Image (spheres, rainbow, N blue to C red):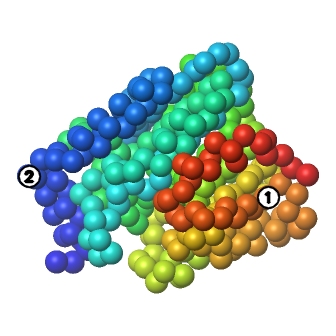
Amino acid sequence: MNQATLFPFLYFLFFISGCGGIQERSDAATSLAAANTFEKTIIKTDSFRLLTYQRINNKSETASIYIEGDGYAFAGRHRVSPNPTPKNPVSLKLAIQDKSPRVFYIARPCQFVPLKHEPLCSPEYWTTKRYAPEIVEAINSAIDQLIKKENISKIRLVGYSGGGTIAALIAARRTDVQDLRTIAGNLDIRAFVLEHDVTPLSGSLNPTAFAKSLASVPQRHFIGNEDKIVTQNITKSYVTALRQFDSKMSCIEIRIIEKVSHAKGWEDVWRDIHQELVACK
């Protein structure tokens, strides 16, 4: 079966196999959010409906916005998952630890929502096109709706793994970003593809292509020293792209976190490392 027929087949397979663990994953995330006083909202954009959770303790003109990772994109090295809803929503768990006055969590398109109501949700949007312009635009639109409703003027973008990619791409197009923080963020998708010898992410945007816009954004990138997926070399490749527009790296900081891998250990350290403000030197 070639790739052209593989995606429709997997999409069909999802419906004939039923929701199975997908509903359980969604229910677990909602229960976790509710237990930590986050309210659930589904936001409609022109292309996708996005699940969001929000906790608003008091009025503030600044909000922290967390973007989820790629989720359950692959069931194996060569097997695409029929549904990207994450088994371990790392970004949600980190958002819960953020005690800022206003905290928002945004899931990626096609995560946590019934795919039968999402005509555009095909596996390409959690594989090769996971960072496509329409994906970035949908999440950016959701942010616009959230901050307009709450009268927010500044945002702090936080993204885990592929959510860090999206956060960087959004930061490049906005003027209200106070700072950008990524956790195990895939900030150079070309370097990622070359390092792991995987299929190119055709149709996806690469943050390095927006280096000029990103160079002036205050940003801090956290990398686990045991991360074998998004390695330090990938982050360094991104920094090299930005250095041509900011040779002193005055707005860019990298922090290596000991005893942390790609998906394990972040919950244990985030409470202690996320609070310090990020600013250009």
- Using the rendered view, name the quadrant where residue 257 is placed: bottom right
Residue at point 43%, 79% (across, down) = 198
**Is 97 left or right of 12, judged from the image as shown?**
right
**245 versus 197 height, above or below:** above
Residue at the outermost left position: 16
Residue at point 86%, 49% (across, down) = 280
Which element carries disc 2, helix, strand or loop?
helix
Q: Is residue 88 visible?
A: yes
Which amino acid is tagged 2? Ile
Q: Nearer the viewer, residue 26 or 35?
A: 35
Q: Is residue 140 visible?
A: no
In the rendered structure, which disc, 1 or 2, sits on the residue that comes first in sequence?
Answer: 2
Percent position of residue 79, x then y = 26, 71
Percent position of residue 131, x then y = 49, 58
Percent position of residue 272, x then y = 68, 45
Percent position of residue 111, x then y = 35, 45
Which element carries disc 1, helix, strand or loop?
strand
Tell me the crowding category of disc 2: few under 14, some 14 to 19, or many 20 or more residues within 10 angstroms, Cα based: few
Rounded to the nearest whole Å, what is the CA distance between mark 1 and mark 2? 48 Å
Q: Nearer the viewer, residue 211 or 63?
A: 63
| Residue designated by label 2 | 16
Specify the label residue 194 is tagged with.
none
Image quarter where the N terminus lies is: bottom left
**129 versus 78 height, above or below:** above
| Residue designated by label 1 | 252
Residue at point 54%, 48% (across, down) = 267
Which amino acid is tagged 1? Ile
Residue at point 35%, 31% (across, down) = 31
